[in-house]
Image (cartoon, rainbow, N blue to C red):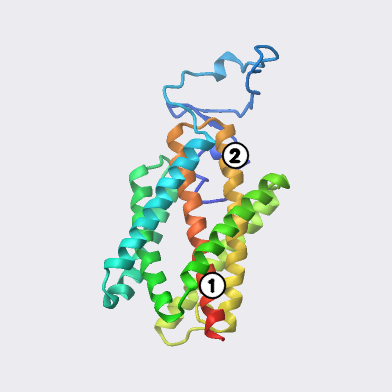
Amino acid sequence: MQSSNPVFARSEGFNGRRVSQSGVTYPDYNAPAPSPHGFGEQQAPEHYAPARPQAPMTIDSVVQKTGITLGLVVLTAALTWVFLPEQLLGMAWMGGAFAGLGLALVISFKKVISPGLVLAYAAVEGLFVGAMSKTFESMWDGVVVGAVVGTFAAVAGTLAAYKFFNIQVSPKFRKWVVAAMFGFVAVVLLDFVLSLFGSAIGFNGFGPLGLIMSVIGLGLGVLMLILDFDFVERGIAARLPEQESWRAAFGLTVTIIWIYIEMLRILAILRGQD
């Protein structure tokens, strides 16, 4: 099944096909793992089993790379919070946002994942998150802690629901979520451009319309997280090379930052209405 997610679509393995180290794509035969008792094994045909000089991606490697990537985001955000002067926060906020968007596009459309670019993205997003968080905290005391707790709760709750309720991602579900995501981003960017000419609609503001948009954005973030979990499972089932764990880490990091930003905006807007 071809993925519609731009982060994962460039990788064959995340779309149900196995890729050898030489770049050859093989059909997804999904042979069951050997029995721990030494019997009942089902072997794949010999011509579908090329030598693998690199270990395959596992859930442990995905967790490890995601931890490294998110850890760098948090570290850079903390350094920005502590050392960046207040008069530079706006510049860091905007610069980090646009630099992060550019790096995200480059990473998304690269067929071969680059760990260096993923880490560069994490550092730039840390600058953006740190500057934005410090600005919001100076205006609405306590919103950052609430947003962090809310993000952890959203991620943990979504993962629990995905596993315990055995959520199945259908092609139609995937198509609608991705279409909604692009539509949401288009509306937000349009409102930003209009704001440069003094004609903003209010989608990025802190009024009722801004609150509605952030609630929608948070809902989309949770749905995208479900897609991310599904894509990671597909990659592991396809036995992708271990390096593809960086692509999975990148996709999860993008979504988690999305959820945090929307959570931060919701709390700020609600605090502003007190």
User: Considering the image in quadrants, where does the N terminus appear?
Assistant: top right
Number of residues whose C-alpha sits closer than 10 Å to that of mark 2, classed few (under 14), some (14–19) or many (20 or more): some
Identified at 41% across, 39% down, the residue is: 112
Task: Of the two numbered discs 2 and 1 on the same chain, state the one appearing first in sequence.
Answer: 1
- Checking the image for residue 79, the label placed there is none
Q: Is residue 272 left or right of residue 125?
A: right
Identified at 58% across, 65% down, the residue is: 218
Which residue matches tag 1?
Answer: 187
Q: Is residue 196 left or right of residue 208?
A: left
Q: Secondary structure at mark 2?
A: helix
- Checking the image for residue 233, the label placed there is 2
Q: Measured from the top left, where is residue 181 in percent x and y?
A: 57, 62
> Real-space Cα distance between discs 2 and 1?
31 Å
Q: Is residue 157 left or right of residue 60?
A: right
Nearer-the-camera pick, 26 or 177: 177
Q: Measured from the top left, where is residue 9 in percent x and y?
A: 52, 45
Image: 122 above or below 233: below
Can you see residue 178?
no
Q: Measured from the top left, where is residue 228 in percent x and y?
A: 57, 49
Depth-wise, is mark 2 or mark 1 nearer the camera? 2
User: Considering the image in quadrants, where does the C terminus appear?
Assistant: bottom right
Can you see residue 88?
yes
Nearer-the-camera pick, 141 or 264: 141
Identified at 40% across, 82% down, the residue is: 196
Image: 29 above or below 77: above
Number of residues whose C-alpha sits closer than 10 Å to that of mark 1, classed few (under 14), some (14–19) or many (20 or more): some
Image: 4 above or below 13: below
